[in-house]
Amino acid sequence: MSAQARTHFSFARVMAVFLKELVQMRRDRVTFAIMLGMPIIQLLLFGYAINTDPRHMPTVVEARDDGPLTRAFLASMRQSTYFDLVALSHREGEGDRMLEAGEATFLVVIPEKFEERLVRGERPEILFAADASDPIAAGGATGALQQIAQTAFAPDLEGPLHMRQASAAPYDIVVHRCYNPAGVTAFNIVPALLGVILTMTMVMITSIALTRELERGTMESLLATPVRPTEVMLGKTTPYLLVGAVQVGIVLAVAIFLFHIPFTGSVPALLTGVTVFVIANLMLGYLISTVARTQMQAMQMTFFIFLPSILLSGFMFPFAAMPWWAQGIGEALPLTHFLRIVRETILKGGGFAAIGDDLWPLLAILALLTAVALRRFRQTLD
Amino acid sequence: MNGAPVIDVRGLTKRFGGKTVVDDVSLRVPRGAIYGFLGPNGSGKTTTIRLVCGLLRPDHGEGTVLGHDVLRESALIKARIGYMTQKFSLYEDLSIRENLDFVARLYDVPDRAHRVDTALEDLGLATRGRQLAGTLSGGWKQRLALAACMIHDPDLLLLDEPTAGVDPKARRDFWDQIRRYAARGVTTLVSTHYMDEAVQCDFIAFIAYGRKLIDAPTREIPGKVGLTTLRVVADDLEGAAAKLRGMPGVDLVARFGTELHVAGVDAAKLRAAVGSLDGMPGFAATPVEAGLEEAFIHLMTESTDNMQ
Ligand SMILES: Nc1ncnc2c1ncn2[C@@H]1O[C@H](COP(=O)(O)OP(=O)(O)OP(=O)(O)O)[C@@H](O)[C@H]1O
Ligand SMILES: [Mg+2]
């Protein structure tokens, strides 16, 4: 091979760096364990914290009617393990007070003349008010209440009232979510958590890619070889693309099998979004690595990126409610766009058309980060 | 030693934050030469080597290395040099074989697996290829680093104190190997603090405070330094040495076994000074040919402290 040819891009050298990086990653047990264990631990911790299958939720019932149907409903409530009937009130307003005071998580209001109006076919409304600041509980409770109502009223709807049961239920359950009208649920949080985990691990791990070589002194002999900046970059980030893929697999599996998140959208669109997002994070970390002189500095810069990602991406606070300048910062963060992409694809059933508005900004961020990182890469020691 | 010089750089200057660490250094190293680089700690040897291989950009200076422009074509230069750093700079968390394999891949070495096997055998580490490099002793790390920088058969070797901490037998093997390379036309620039290694070089450059003081074929060095040396014996050698030190004309008093080598640039003053000791029991003084050792000890004492 001629000397001239050596200065061209060499796939063999990318492979050299890639394989070296893989071996080092495998040997660095702690980091390796953190990278694969962190998504699992975070999700499980989260799973317990949010408790997707709650029991014995304190409930107050305001019964303004006391016919046999109401009594059957109350009996059914008492049998349910989901609700704990903490109070039975006949006075209007008492339930609201208890809900507000936090003495009950749920309030069920059976309106006046419920039975009479039901018989007349007026579809009376059972009001179900939930303290939705605990969104998971609120989500499940609605379903549980439907069940209770159905079993409670079924026997009484035999006979003369049979025709009332035939079509839709002869009553309406009206759900009021208090304190968290948007109704953020695990369905929202778990996919978003994927973005947070990826931001954390991908940026952190690549941020030390070059600083570690600098600190250990291996940079000097690496730079003395004909290896080019693009080759180092590709070789050093590709192994973590694989780690990212494994993390995505873990989180999605947990999301689907443990949290039963209904996945409705386009898989290729989601995977495209995830891939671009992971690479953008790798480049962000790599850019940090070209700026920081020590691993400590790299870590600090990673957190400097991580905090705004959590706070300004719409993960913590609703994006639309943030001031304009915070939204501006948010738009520049990969996580912001990723959160919208997962929401569109996983929750709203969207495809490529739906994520376009966020895929392009993400690609632009990626291109910018890559270009700056390559420019910043120092081929000399000074 | 024919054709254009392998290293031909002029006026290399490097400053770190206002401090001039390499000051107007020019080097011409012919093909196949072993070129020794000497100087006290902090004199700028490592920095000069880094400038030559393109790891640092000079503030001033120009020239060619292996026929390529040292400022603009460092990628081409890097492909054909083997640089052994002063501090161990292979991967401690890779095995011996993985380190060699990594370097061989970076240089696109043909028939890589075979080349790595041979290197392991030459090192005598064939059975320890799977051991992590970080678990090797200091001397063995040096030997591994040396093998790694030669794995792609470079045309120019830049070795920064390659034998520091290496045992005498391994050092001799190492120098035999350098000689074999030189016979094949490989050029070597090697920094060292060992006199027995300096004498093995074809040329020697002495650098202090970032400036090159002397640059000549090894056998001409003593003449260049211009020392007259007298061998002095006396019953009370320490007493004689104490008297001689600080006398006018005496630049150097060094003890070699049971005798003193007393040297100075001004031959007449030196003789007068040594003559004043006449009458001490067992005193005798005979002229000897000035050697490399005196020359370098003299140069070193002239420029002891290079730290600022
Ligand atoms: N990156 C740097 N930044 C600032 N100063 C530096 C840098 N590298 C070297 N120096 C300074 O330059 C001077 C020469 O250093 P250099 O390492 O070249 O000396 P040396 O001759 O190799 O010494 P030794 O024999 O101890 O290896 C020293 O004073 C050192 O402190
Ligand atoms: Mg040095």
Image (cartoon, coloured by chain):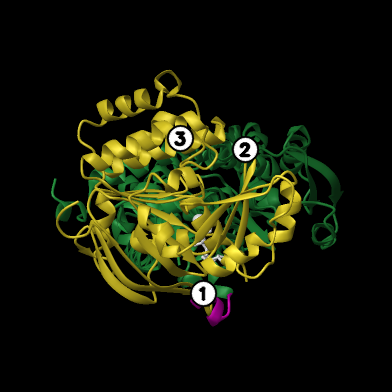
Chain colours: A green, B yellow
Instruction: Categorize mark 1 by other alpha carbons within 10 Å: few (<14), some (14-19), many (20+).
Output: some
Which element is circle 3 on? Answer: helix
Q: Quadrant of residue B205?
A: bottom left
Q: What type of secondary structure mainly makes up the magenta span?
A: helix
* Residue A69: percent from left, percent from top: 71, 41
**Which residue corresponds to the image point at 85% horizontal and 45% vertical from the top-left?**
A86
* Nearer-N-terminus badge (2/1): 2
Magenta residues span A322-329
- Kind of residue at badge 1: Ile
Q: Chain of mark 3?
A: B
User: Quick check: A2 left or right of A338?
Assistant: left
Do dots 2 and 3 share one subunit? no
For label 1, the residue is A329
Q: Real-space Cα distance between discs 2 and 3?
A: 86 Å
For label 2, the residue is A147
**Which residue corresponds to the image point at 72% horizontal and 38% vertical from the top-left?**
A82
Instruction: Answer above or below: position of B122 versus A277.
Output: above
Q: Residue furthest top?
A: B127
- Kind of residue at badge 2: Gln
Instruction: Answer above or below: position of B165 versus B35.
Output: above
Instruction: Answer above or below: position of A139 versus A154.
Output: below
Do dots 2 and 1 share one subunit? yes
Q: Chain of mark 2?
A: A
